[in-house]
Image (cartoon, rainbow, N blue to C red):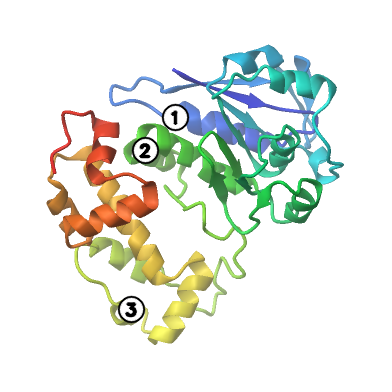
Amino acid sequence: MHRIVAFVRDGVLPIELGIVHRLFAQARSADGSPLYEVLTCTLVPGEVRTDADFTIAVPHGPEVLGTADTVVVLSTEEDYSPHGGPLRGAMAAAFGRIRPGTRVASICTGAFVLAAAGLLDGRRATTHWRSAADLRTLYPAVEVEENVLYTDSGDVLTSAGVAAGIDLCLHMIRRDHGATVANEVARGTIVAPHREGGQAQFIQRPVPESRISSTAKARAWALEHLDRPLSLRELAACESMSVRTFTRRFREEVGISPVQWITRQRIERARQLLEETDLPVDRIAEDAGFGTAASLRQHLQAALGVSPRAYRATFRGPALTAG
């Protein structure tokens, strides 16, 4: 099993620790076997203070960092008064135990620890939007992007605030085991199965005012008709809005344009079909609304950096690469 080690510090936010344990622990193979083992560690095993009115008992010390396949660094209230500089003392020693090639991720202001360890130098990274300016000032070698949910640089990943930690964990599960496993975890947790990392972390009006119509009906209708061309006029008609009003309202609610959203949903549909069916690529392209296999290849390459054939081989094995 892939071992996830959650690294906690004094003043940890319990909700973040719960996210890591809950999401990865729910990931199962087709035969029901767990795909991850999740451990929690801290600098000195024992009681660790949280930002709430209770403590947590952490049984493992930093030695388990050396056994991890993925290390997730959680935030702490102390991060909100950062001082910058490299890791020192026990923290430096703890991070020195992490094996080369281990995937390292952070939730919220845990990114400051990764930056102090030098893991974010020259990389894209994010944190909570309130702390992004501090991260940029204290660690100028980091390419801070405060308006995204999470970043993925391969073996180093970062996420914004608490809810974005859910998106990051689902993204790692999806990257490891495909859309089907990640979607099942999301369904069990009752959260959105996938939000792109590039989506804005702060939307001015994420929940529409009660007197304003939503675009949810149009989105639901679009998901049922992804296999055919969809026009803004049709989507706007679902909500009895003008195209201009619908487009503005959609961006306010979702954070991206209707066209971008539809493209992402089509990519997700194609991924699901590549993982779960033996349909040829040209049929999958039609069902997902891309029209041609060439169009699907182009979009999948742009979004994931792989061809449909390679994607299917990754998640279903080399014997199932037709098309």
Q: In the picture shown, does residue 138 fall above or below 181?
A: below
Looking at the image, tell me whether mark 1 or mark 3 is earlier in sequence order.
Answer: 1
Residue 38: x and y, percent? 54, 22
Q: Secondary structure at mark 1?
A: helix
N-terminal label among 1 and 2: 1
Q: Nearer the viewer, residue 61 or 314?
A: 314
**Considering the image in quadrants, where does the N terminus appear?**
top left
Q: Quadrant of residue 58?
A: top right
Q: Quadrant of residue 40?
A: top right
Q: Position of residue 126 (x, y in %)?
A: 64, 49
**Left or right of 98, for residue 212:** left
Q: CA distance from mark 1 to mark 3?
A: 38 Å
Residue that mark 1 sits on: 26
The residue carrying mark 2 is: 184
Quadrant where the C terminus lies? Answer: top left
SS category of the residue bearing label 3? helix
Task: Return the x and y of residue 245 as percentages of the image width and height.
Answer: 45, 84
Residue at which label 3 appears: 232
Query: Image quarter for residue 181?
Result: top left
Distance CA(mark 3)–CA(mark 2): 31 Å
Q: Secondary structure at mark 2?
A: helix
Q: Is residue 248 left or right of residue 275?
A: right
The residue sitting at 28% across, 21% down in the picture is: 31
Residue pictured at 66% horizontal, 56% vertical: 146
* Relative vertical location of residue 228 with respect to residue 172 in this rendering, above or below: below
